[in-house]
Amino acid sequence: MSSTLLEEDLSCPVCCDVFSDPVLLPCSHSFCRSCLQSFWGSSVFRSCPVCRRRVSKKQPPSNLALRNLCEAFVQSQSSRCESERKAACPQHGEKLKLFCVDDRQSICVVCQASRMHKGHNCAPTDEAALDCKEKLTFALKTLKDKLDVVTKLRMTSAMTLEHIKSQVQLIENQIKQHFIKLHQFLREEEEARLSALQEEEQKKVLAVKLRDKELANRISSLSDIIRLTEQEIAADDLTLLQNFQSAMERAQTSSPNPKEFHGALIDEAKHLSNLKFRVWEKMQHIAPYSPVTLDPNTVHPCLRLSDDLNSVHYCSSGLPLPSNPERFCVSAEVLGSTCVGSGKHAWEVELGENDDWILGVASVSVKRDLEVPARPENGFWTLCLRDGEYRAMVSPLKTLKVDKKLEKVQVEVDWDAGEVCFSCPENGQTLHKFSEAFTDEVVPYFYTQSKNPLRIVPQLVTVSLKKNVRCVE
């Protein structure tokens, strides 16, 4: 409604108030319908109260345009009165020119001098509004940052879903290849394992979809809070000050960012580790057994694992793998699939022509998104081959005396005794021994930037039953 529109332009000539349900006479004069009916009720002839021109007995038509203008004028007057009422001190009738920071309320100059606000920290309304706007702007930026994080997490969820599908396809193909080589007697075992894979797929996919739904809801919630916060910032100063507390509470009480989604991927090692041995074990035959298998969910994108998960080599082109929390994303590293938290464990690694490697054990809690030296202070107990020298990864580095080129390295872990021993299996020479009071589980660790593979040597295991006790020799 234009501010220049005067009330008299919208007033009825009879009642002198703003038109109410105005009607239009042929002479172009307008009146309130009730005023015109009252005037005609006291007259002999129907005529215009202004120009006295006679009119027909038909009911005059409503003046819709004038009615809309009057309604808009009345509404604007009501809003202005409400705004002026809010802008005036309800106790003293003065304009609210100050804001009491201590009591978080708008006050007038009389209030400032009163006992209630005497000695309080007060600021001009515009300055206080600016301060509140700055705080809300900062809160808005935090909300938008959270929205970016959640959006990226949702994008990762989409990639995880695709990777799960490819994992399932890969594992299914390998399982089938293994079972084709076995006797018809093992068909039931094959079906059972495929069924287990499909069940895990359903669980994993369901978990990721639920996670995706949660992230979508979080995005919607944050978007709503951001929209409301932006509206508060865009409001006039007094409205901003009056709604500031609730706006800040709404912006700051949003829940924290969702945590990273651990364990989202298909557990390839569970389905493939020692598969032939575990199936063959039921048939009581001799079969190769690998004491350590590599975990594809931890492998760096530039490393390639063999189908049986027993060897690893480097490739300069990285694979499009999801950035799940278990994966090494900076350095070319991979972990074994089995954690060691008690007892004695040993395995051999065939080095071949690989001339750039680090191997040993690592704590399960080592950082995957940072590149740190593979030393005990960082949760690693390892040997390496660098620049033609065999070294123990300690501070400072210790160069090892080796008579000839190592073909294999044996790693022995006694978790209870806190020992990690490296030796040469060909001659039994001890290369290095770490002594550590383990407080966490450890897991086999491998690093390489060579195209020549590191291979875990399989063991020949005889399975027999003696007095209901399984013996492994």
Image (cartoon, helix red, strand yellow):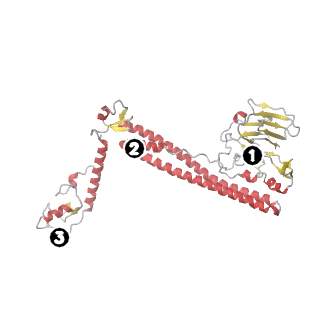
Residue found 69% across the figure and 59% down from its top: 198
Residue found 44% across the figure and 46% down from its top: 230
Q: Position of residue 426 (x, y in %)?
A: 88, 40
Give the mark nearer the N terminus: 2 vs 1. Answer: 2
| SS label for mark 1 | loop
Kindly identify the amino acid type of the residue bearing the numbered disc 1: Thr
Disc 1 residue crowd, few under 14, some 14–19, many 20+, Cα 10 Å: some
Q: Give left or right: position of 236 versus 58.
A: right
Residue found 71% across the figure and 60% down from its top: 195
Judge by depth and name the residue closer to the eye, 327 or 2: 327
Q: Which residue is mark 1?
A: 338
Q: Which residue is mark 3?
A: 57
Q: Give left or right: position of 66 versus 392.
A: left
Q: CA distance from mark 3 to mark 2?
A: 57 Å
Residue at the farthest bottom position: 57
Q: Are marks 2 and 1 in contact (CB under 8 Å)?
A: no
Q: Which residue is mark 2?
A: 243
Judge by depth and name the residue closer to the eye, 398 or 191: 191
Kindly identify the amino acid type of the residue bearing the numbered disc 3: Lys
| SS label for mark 3 | loop
Judge by depth and name the residue closer to the eye, 418 or 100: 418
